[in-house]
Image (tube, rainbow, N blue to C red):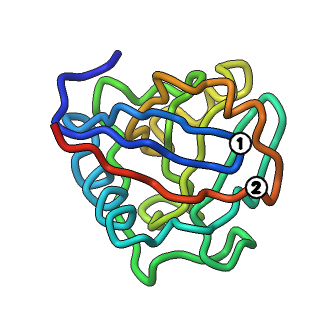
């Protein structure tokens, strides 16, 4: 379900662009955190450090190892309508409830993701460039995340 929102993003990668619609109503704090980091250039040049075929591509670790973050933690937002991990959904990675920060993942499909529902905050969905999800390999870079305010 795509919401009537005020912001979108283009996640630019070495394999192409993914256009994202945010779930501002369901995950306002998570969206605001991601938008701030993107506007600050935090994600520029970071890699997709974890790629599991038919599951997820994960990025947003400044160390490229999966253990780094922005230096703070954010709370999970799990009660909204769109907490359903399907193809193209953006969700916050974390090391346990309320420990997310900058790492996020994008789902390849629904086949292996139902256990993530209401455990990881869904905060947007790729609506154009879905083929880029399949093309990303471990180590591929995010060149920039452009925020589009409507």
Image x and y of residue 78, in percent: 36, 40
Image x and y of residue 92, in percent: 49, 51
Give the mark nearer the N terminus: 1 vs 2.
1
Question: Would you call the spot at circle 1 few (<14 residues within 10 Å), some (14-19), or many (20 or more)?
Answer: some
Image x and y of residue 129, in percent: 57, 27
Q: Nearer the viewer, mark 1 or mark 2?
A: 1
Residue occupying the point 30% across, 34% down = 23
The image quarter in which residue 17 lies = top right
Q: Is residue 87 left or right of residue 66?
A: left
The image quarter in which residue 19 lies = top left
Height in image: 64 above or below 7? Answer: below
Height in image: 89 above or below 95? Answer: above
Height in image: 45 above or below 131? Answer: below
Secondary structure state at the residue bearing disc 1: loop
Residue occupying the point 29% across, 65% down = 36
Q: Nearer the viewer, residue 114 or 131?
A: 131
The image quarter in which residue 114 lies = top right
Residue occupying the point 37% across, 53% down = 76
Height in image: 10 above or below 125? Answer: below
Image quarter hosting the N terminus: top left
- The residues tagged by marks 1 and 2 sit, at their Cα atoms, a distance apart of 8 Å
What residue sits right under mark 1 in the picture?
Answer: 15
Image x and y of residue 118, in percent: 45, 36
What residue sits right under mark 2 in the picture?
Answer: 140
Q: Nearer the viewer, residue 46 or 118?
A: 46
Q: Are marks 1 and 2 in contact (CB under 8 Å)?
A: yes
Q: Is residue 70 left or right of residue 22?
A: right
Q: Nearer the viewer, residue 35 or 80?
A: 35
Question: Would you call the spot at circle 2 few (<14 residues within 10 Å), some (14-19), or many (20 or more)?
Answer: some
């Amino acid at each position: 379900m795509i919401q009537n929102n005020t912001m979108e993003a283009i996640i630019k990668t070495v394999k192409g662009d993914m256009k994202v619609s945010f779930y501002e109503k369901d995950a306002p704090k998570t969206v605001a955190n991601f938008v701030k980091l993107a506007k600050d250039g935090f994600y520029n040049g970071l890699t997709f450090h974890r790629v599991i075929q038919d599951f997820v591509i994960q990025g947003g670790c400044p160390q490229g190892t999966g253990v780094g973050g922005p230096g703070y933690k954010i709370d999970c937002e799990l009660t909204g309508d769109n907490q359903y991990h399907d193809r193209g959904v953006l969700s916050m990675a974390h090391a346990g409830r309320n420990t997310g920060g900058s790492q996020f993942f994008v789902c390849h499909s629904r086949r292996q993701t139902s256990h993530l529902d209401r455990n990881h905050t869904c905060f947007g969905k790729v609506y154009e460039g879905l083929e880029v999800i399949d093309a990303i390999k471990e180590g591929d870079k995010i060149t920039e995340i452009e925020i589009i305010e409507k």
